[in-house]
Image (cartoon, helix red, strand yellow):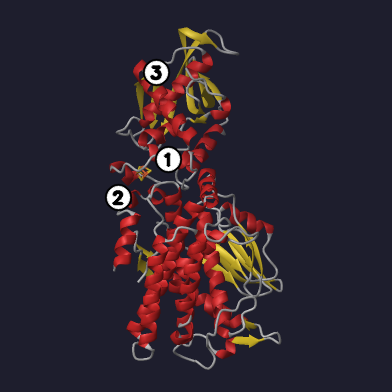
Amino acid sequence: MKKLLNTLYITLPDAYLALKGENVVIVQDEEVIGRVPLHNLEAICTFGRQGASPALMAACMEKSIAITFLSTSGRFRGRVIGSTKGNVTLRRTQYRFADDEEKSTEISKHFLIGKLYNAKWSLERITRDHALRIDLEKFKTKSAFLSESIQQLTVADNLEVLRGIEGNAASAYFSVMDDMILQQKEDFFYKGRSRRPPLDNVNALLSFVYTLLASDVGAALETVGLDAYVGFLHRDRPGRMSLALDVMEELRSVYADRFVLSLINKKQVQASDFLKKESGAVIMTDKARKEILQLWQKRKEEQITHPFLKEKISWGLVPHAQAMLLARFLRGDLDAYPPFLWK
Amino acid sequence: MTVYDSSEFLSLSGIQHFEFCERQWALIHIEQEWEENVLTIEGNQLHERTDDPFIREKRKGVLYVRGLPVHSAILGLTGICDVVEFYKDENGVTLDKEEGKYLPIPVEYKRGKPKKDQSDIFQLTAQAICLEDMLFCKVSQGSLFYHEIRRRIDVEITEELKKQVKETARRMHEYYQRRHTPRVKTGKHCKNCSLRHICLPELLTKESVASYMKRMLAE
Ligand code: SF4
């Protein structure tokens, strides 16, 4: 499997990206403040307002390095990618499956089984690692509920039913989110999900990390030739990477939530990293964002054994592995899509 | 006999992939999945050669033509011959701007050494059939030049070979029309396959997803 190269994250709001030779150079106030050889990169993600030069975009397209543009607050704005892999057959199969309720249900079922399985084992892991600090009984009940929901998923036969089961299971899981926060409880608490805008520190962190994960998953899907915008569980909505959201379901708890929790529990973020706006919206400071991105990159380098492939890969390659397995299933090489089941 | 329209032509060089592994061919030519090292490198090399200023040169009565585009409607293939040598021959055909009659011999350059399988010979045979179709003559000789051993190996293009190549081309078209990527037949050849990271031959010998799910959910 291909080696994970790095994503270059640009967090300076006024940085401009340009091409010089075979390097991407980061320019601020007409001064070059950084330089990275393109051959070391797999993707570029910028939170800057200034954008990138056409020459850099052309060079990246040629080398199939995707450039993702996010707003300074981390909202996805768009992506520049080279010509998509010519695999029109695979895409057509994807569309055909997406148009077919039964087939969409079969695939979605596996996404959601993955999601609930990983949520369940995230809870189980907490009961194992922090038995003395949490209400064991509560966690065991929620975990049992998730097991039950997984059973229900296996026999569900349409998307509506799947969504219903998932909705209940997700609220069971999130009902102990606050209990998983073991440090800095006065500044970090979870009382429910708020988006656009996030209204507390934990939600601000979750939104930010979900954005990072979604853009990694989207890039992985495009790399194997799938259309990240056409999903099976999430229906099409202009500008939304529905398939990325589908595949991301499995990874939310085990990859994103656990990352957020460890930031808080290891005190890698502090209350001072967040600002509350007059509107109630919570935003992160640039400094915090930069530190989180560094830790995110580090996290991606950690090695694991993929449960289905039984191969050692880094966490950062998990989205690629799942994208590849999904493509394999769509083209008929596998009997089903194997979700990433982690415990 | 099927005669293909030029819009249906497939790449002649694909025949060597097809002979090496049908799945590899499908991954490259149907699914357009290739890694840098396969087609792009071939393409670049070809490019260098067709940029050769001596596109057509004559030495000792032999005419050398480089980078000659060829096709055959019977095979439904199109490609480029590295070099075609034209020898004076009574049974040959007349050529524009040349006196006398000539017969062509395709010469294909390979970077490596002779292979155990027939893939290079098949590619050469397909070129021979194209030349026959385009020039209305009979081609019964071809040569492979292997760079690694710096040797030229003459190949007799028999009727039997031509028959096999026609059959192979027919199968390529059949798969292409169905957009069919054959399942993996793993073997020793996978070790030398540049697409193994995409194909993942090990994957298909693994447990089924159904049993993976069952096993994991049972725990
Ligand atoms: S890895 Fe093996 S089966 Fe797959 S394309 Fe290559 S040679 Fe064929």
Kindly indicate whether the residues beneath marks 2 and 1 are on one polypeptide chain. Answer: yes
In depth, the one of B53 and B134 nearer the eye is B134
x, y percentage for residue A4?
45, 62
> Which kind of residue does numbered mark 3 sit on?
Gln
Which of labels 2 and 3 is toward the front? 2
Circle 3 residue: B141
Q: Is residue A81 above or below residue B130?
A: below
| Mark pair 2, 3: CA separation | 42 Å
| Mark pair 3, 1: CA separation | 33 Å
Which of labels 3 and 1 is toward the front? 1
Circle 2 residue: B205
| Mark pair 2, 1: CA separation | 17 Å
In depth, the one of A86 and A107 nearer the eye is A107
Q: Residue furthest bottom?
A: A186
> Which kind of residue does numbered mark 1 sit on?
Thr
Residue at left offset 38%, top offset 81%: A141
SS of the residue at dot 1? loop
Circle 1 residue: B181
